[in-house]
Structures are given as C-alpha cells and as structure tokens.
Image (tube, rainbow, N blue to C red):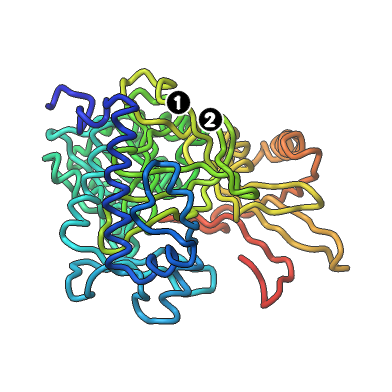
Amino acid sequence: MIDSPYWNPKNETMPREELKRLQLFKLKRLIEWAYERVPFHRRRFDAAGFQPDQLKSLDDLRRIPTMTRDDWVTAQTEKPLWGDLIATEPRNAIRYHLTSGSTGRQPLRALDSTKDWEWISEMWSYGSWGFGVRPDDVVYFAFGYGSFIGFWGAHYACEKIGALVVPGGAQTTERRIEQILELGVTTVYSTPTYALRLWQEAVEMGIDLAKSKVERVIVSGEPAGSIPAMKRQLEHGWGAKCGDTAGMTEIGTIFTFECSEQPGGTHIIEDHMYEEVMNPASGEPAPYGELGERVVTSFGRGFIPLIRYRSGDIVMRVPHNTCKCGRTSDIYDGGIRGRWDDMKLIRGTNVYPRAVESIIREYDSIDEFQIYVWRDENNIRDEITVRIELKPDQQAEWEEVRERLGKDLAAAHEGLRFNLELMPQGSLPRYELKAKRLVDARPQAGGLQG
C-alpha cells in the first residue's frame, strides 16, 4: 500500500455510479438509525411528513428539511447539556469537544464514541495520506490540544499511518520552531495563519525554514488555505508543498482534502459524506461551476448524526476529472471560499473577507492585516478600513502599497473605496487557531458585532 497514492484505493477510485449506490445504502442506514434513536431528527422527519422507508433515491433526501447551527444550539439550550440530538446515553461517550467560538451564544457541544473516533481518524487518514504523509515521516502539530477539535483527528490519523507524531502543545512559537528543526520534522500541521507566523518568527530568529527537512505543510481551519497567494507565500517561506483540508466540529473531522497533485481545489470524501451544493436564497441545487452553500450529511458520526446540515460555507463544485490523480470524488474548486454569513454589505456592495484577503496576500510586504467595518460620526454612512502592518524592513513602501492596494480592492468590489491605515508593527492580533480578522463595529441590535 505504501506505493499507492490512495489511503483507500477501492473507494477512492470507485466508478461514480457505484459510488452513488454506496451513498444510498449508507443514507438509508443512517436515516433509519436517526429516526429510531434521535428525538431531534424524529421530530423533524415527522413534521415534514417523511418516513425512512420513503428514501428510495439520493434525490429523496431533499424531502428532509435542512438543519442549522441555530437548531443545534437551541436544542442544547432547551435541554442542557446535550439537547436531544444524541443517539445514546452520554455515559457511552469517550470524548467531549466544542466549537472554538460562539459569537455571543453558547458553543456547540459534541460527544463521540470509540467507533466515532475510529471514523474521525480514518477521514484524516484519507487527507494525510493523499497529500503524501507516510510511515517514515516525522509529523509536528503546531496546535494547542484544547477542547476545540481542530487537529486531534489528524494526530490519530498520523499515528494510524505509522508516522512519528510530535504534539506541539502549549509552547511558544520560538520553541516550536526549535523543535521542528531539532527533531527533523518533515510534515507540519497548522492553520494557514499560524504557519505564516511560524515562518515570520523563524526569519526574526535568523532561521531559514526552507533549509529545514519540512517537505509539506498541511493546513486547516481557515479559508485562506486555498488562497493561491497565501499558498505561494507559505511554499516559498517553508520550501515545502502546502496542502489544504477543511473540516468542522459538527462532523468532528475533515470532509475534503487537497491531494498531492494540487489541482486548485479539494476532493470531497464522498464515500463517507453526502454533500449538496445549494443556492442559499432559493434552496434549489446549484449546478457544477456555480457558487452555493454546502449542505452536508455525514455517514460516520453515530453519536450525533448530522443530516442535511447547512454549513454556511461558500463552495463551487466541479467534476472529479478536473484533477488527474485518479480519484472519482468531486472537487470543491478553490476549497472553501468563505462563509455566506461573513459577507458584509457596504454601501450596496457585497464584501467577503476571503476575497479581501486573496488580494492582500499578493503583497509580500504586508505582515498582518485587519478588516474594520464602521459607521461615520453621523451614523449614516458605512465605511470599511483595512488596517495594515508592513514587514519591519518594508516600511518605506507604504505609499506605494496604499495606492496600489486601494486600486486593487476597489477594482474587485465595484469601485467601493477602502480606507487603508498603516498600523505600528506588532499592534494587530496574531492567531494560532482560527484567525478573526474581521471587526464589525457598526451599531447593531443588541450591541456590537465582531
């Protein structure tokens, strides 16, 4: 198997018609399990007039209403701690995790069984092996190992593969860099933002990471992982290939990964997920090549079954043969392109943080940034400011950067004027996990939105 590019050769190269039959078989089993064991889903199915025996085709799944994060939070609020979403008693769980942030509301709480964790690590094995991780690798996790599920599954996947795993844990960035060098690390897992920070810190330490033994940097947790300019920066700084993955706490693991061919997108793990792309306004399916919202049904997490969950992720699905790797699973072109609920309307123009970041990352002189949305002193006109930190040796380039960047941002946003503000070095936040570079300080009902 070590010579195969696939973790699961049979399933990853399965003909599409056979794959659809497998999905339907797993869907039927999941729907029956959820109806029998999970009050939350039984209530939803009954309200829609749906019975498990009515699932005759993949299209029949659309007879079930979608569920949302608010549905999950409401269920757990009304019946703490777990709501009525779990399929068995809490005493049967072996792990507890929760989301990394809740924007003012309680986080989502998740329980998993031994079987769930076997599946979670298996999904990460697809992605890790697919990007080249092998038993002789030394793998470093630049990750805090808290209750946020993050890279826990990847850790166990690399152990399953047989690689030597090094948990970074609660250490300084400087100490992590030292460990990467002294242990001869070949693969690093991190968020895109923190991988960039590790490189920047190494430069300040006088260390050239491109001369280290690191061959690949595997990122997750932010849409930035598929931004071409960000990947170019990371691959240049680390002297290594940079691969993107995407997961979510709600399913406990990744659902898509970039293979070693790097086709400009990420493969959906379709033998373990049923992914729909939906027009978020009409609720109708979005065809290949059209932006839409991910709606996911997960086959593997039995403790908390996830059925037709609206993720909020912006994606564009394209056929599997877009990539030459031989996998028959479809691809999300450009990975996760952002979130529909991150979109900000500024004077009639839609602004997406990922689109702004994709432009900013084209400027090698920029060290860090923040998007600040506010309202003028008369509380009438919405404004958007991009706060910029330049690299220490690039301060003299500010006037040129301001002029060019202002034009680039306006050109990509229907002529919208972006204010640009130079910030003192080190004044903007740095992140280890998911970066939160958007601050919306406009008056909102119930307070400020951040």
Q: How many marks?
A: 2
Of labels 2 and 1, earlier in sequence is 2
Relative image position of residue 84 (x, y in whole percent): 35, 74
Which residue is label 2 attached to?
Answer: 288
Is disc 1 surrounded by few (<14), some (14 to 19) or many (20+) residues within 10 Å? some
Tell me what residue is drawn at x 39 percent, y 53 percent: 248
| Residue to which mark 1 is pinned | 319
What is the quadrant of residue 189 in the picture?
top left
Q: In this view, does 163 lie to the left or right of 153?
A: left
Vertically, is 40 above or below 297? below
- Hey, which residue is sitting farthest bottom in the picture? 79
The reply, left or right, for residue 66 in relation to residue 51 is: right
Residue flagged by tag 1: what amino acid is it? Pro
Quick check: marks 2 and 1 in contact, CB under 8 Å? yes
Give the amino acid at mark 2.
Tyr
Residue under the image location 44 percent in, 46 percent down: 60
For the residue pair 277 and 221, the one nearer the viewer reads as 277
